[in-house]
Image (spheres, helix red, strand yellow):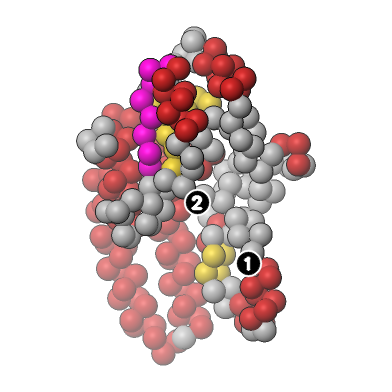
Amino acid sequence: MICSGAELEVGWLPLLQRQAGNKNVLPNARGYFEAASMVERLDVHAEVDRSMGDVHAAGNPHVHLDPRRILTIATALQTRLIELDPAGKEVYQQRFDNFKQRWQKAMTQWQQQASQLKGTRMVVHHRDWVYLFDWLGIEIAGALEPKPGLPTTAGHLVSLKQALKTKSAAKIVYTAYQNPRAAKRFAQMTNIPAVELPYTVGGADEVNDLFSLFDVTIKRLTGEQQ
């Protein structure tokens, strides 16, 4: 069983694991693979309480938005699959090598395409984007949520607009699964363009794998595709 981890699936996965009656997919078993635990996580807090909003004690779970971390996760997954199925080693190795070659080539291309974004500031709806922004050198200028997971309020948008007067932002980004109302409202208030990003595979019609996820994300961030 493969999951993102860092408590992203905490609301439903433990129940599913218990109902499965399969000890091999429980936490700490070899058949349980938690992607976030394979990489360094951002937004890790020494202490977490509910007053902070929807904050994960194990750190930000959206690790799939950094291609560098994806490659690290893929390497660890290959190793785990070989441990579980030694007879399939050659197949796993070949497929990983093929993925690694294509992924590294794509990463170089994405970095070249996104070079203009380095040093820019963007407003986010939720802190989904810390890993992508860390990779591309983009600064989070603010969030539409007053606290992670809390709904946007009119008062918060006014405060955020005031905060951006000294140093504005290039874009407002939100995901396909978030209500676009707040982003579009803030775009009207500030004349900062709002851009919907797919966030994950299936988040846009043309996003059917990890490669197209980053293709579309970078094109939308750079303005090549709206």
Q: Amino acid at mark 1?
A: Leu
Between 109 and 79, the one lying in front of the other is 109
Q: Is residue 171 magenta?
A: no
Residue 76 image point, x, y percent: 48, 67
Residue at 64% x, 73% y: name it. Answer: 16
Circle 2 SS class = helix
Which span is picked out in magenta? 190-197
Taking 195 as reference, is 143 left or right? right
Residue at 61% x, 35% y: name it. Answer: 151
Circle 1 SS class = helix
Residue 126 image point, x, y percent: 54, 38
- The CA span between labels 2 and 1 is 18 Å
* Disc number for residue 140: none
Q: Is residue 193 above or below residue 40?
A: above
Q: Residue furthest bottom?
A: 87
Q: Which residue is mark 2?
A: 63
Instruction: Inspect this view and state whether residue 38 appears.
Output: no
Dot 2, how many residues are within 10 Å of its Cα: few (below 14), some (14-19), or many (20+)? many
Q: Which residue is mark 1?
A: 13
Q: Is residue 193 above or below residue 206?
A: above
Residue at 27% x, 53% y: name it. Answer: 206
Instruction: Inspect this view and state whether residue 89 appears.
Output: yes
Between 33 and 15, the one lying in front of the other is 15
Q: Is residue 177 above or below residue 122?
A: below
Q: Amino acid at mark 2?
A: Val
In primary-sequence order, the first of circles 2 and 1 is 1
Dot 1, how many residues are within 10 Å of its Cα: few (below 14), some (14-19), or many (20+)? some
Image quarter of residue 163: top right
